Image (cartoon, rainbow, N blue to C red):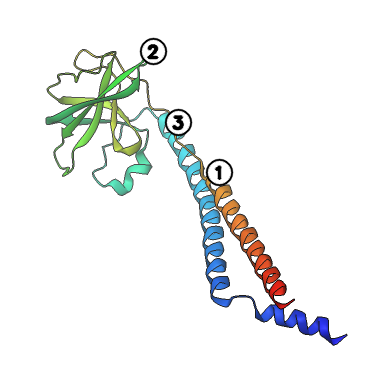
Amino acid sequence: MAAPFAYGADMTTRIPILPTIIVAGAIAVMVALGFWQLSRMDEKEALIAQAEQNLRRSSEVEYPMNTARMDEVLYRRTTIDCAEVLSVNPRAGTSARGAKGWAQRASCAVAGRDAPLNVDIGWSLRPEPAEWQGGEVRGTIAPGGRVVSASGLAGLEPLASPDPRALPNNHLAYAGQWFFFALTALAIYILALRRRAGGTRAKED
């Protein structure tokens, strides 16, 4: 009756210590990342709720030169002065009437701001850069800190207004992926230990 107990104790000592520690650490990191994504999901939901509230406000705010305040004024209306147009780079965009085409994005030099400010000045059907000399722009602060003009400038059509519902909130899916990775790593390691134990028994037999 003592042999099975001795054999089980022997198998316990055969579990590789260092690989087990490494795998356990990796699984712990994956689980922690999963919970972090769940916390990010709650933060993003709060940000979207605030953005929807901001969009309903008719009053304007001063464009923040401090990027740390950008989330507070996201989707608020503002007015900026494009002192100099550095470049115009069209990219895929949608007009106010729902047509697909090109958003004409100007890179502007703005007084009091070191980095250029992106301003979406309007929509065009063709991708050729629009000619715009700059000036005052009234619009909405969109994700990334760019300003989307409320009216079409330089003879362009107005762009579709920024929509907070377009903000991605995939953190639940990301959390699920990390938990799945952790579970998969655990299952693979258990199978590896079983195969190792089976190979050891075969050699002993």
Mark positioned earlier in the residue sequence (2 or 1): 2
Mark positioned earlier in the residue sequence (2 or 3): 2
Secondary-structure class at tag 1 = helix
| Type of amino acid under label 3 | Ala
Residue 92 x/y as whole percent: 33, 23
Mark positioned earlier in the residue sequence (3 or 1): 3
Separation of disc 2 and disc 3 at Cα? 17 Å
Residue at 32% x, 46% y is 69
In this figure, which residue is indicated by the disc labeled 1?
Answer: 173
- Give the side of residue 107 with respect to residue 15, left or right: left
Secondary-structure class at tag 2 = loop
In this figure, which residue is indicated by the disc labeled 2?
Answer: 97
Tag 2 near tag 3, CB within 8 Å? no
Residue 86 x/y as whole percent: 13, 31
The answer to which image quadrant residue 119 occupies is: top left
Q: Is residue 5 above or below residue 163?
A: below
Tag 2 near tag 1, CB within 8 Å? no
The answer to which image quadrant residue 144 occupies is: top left
Seen from the viewer's position, the closer of residues 70 and 201 is 201
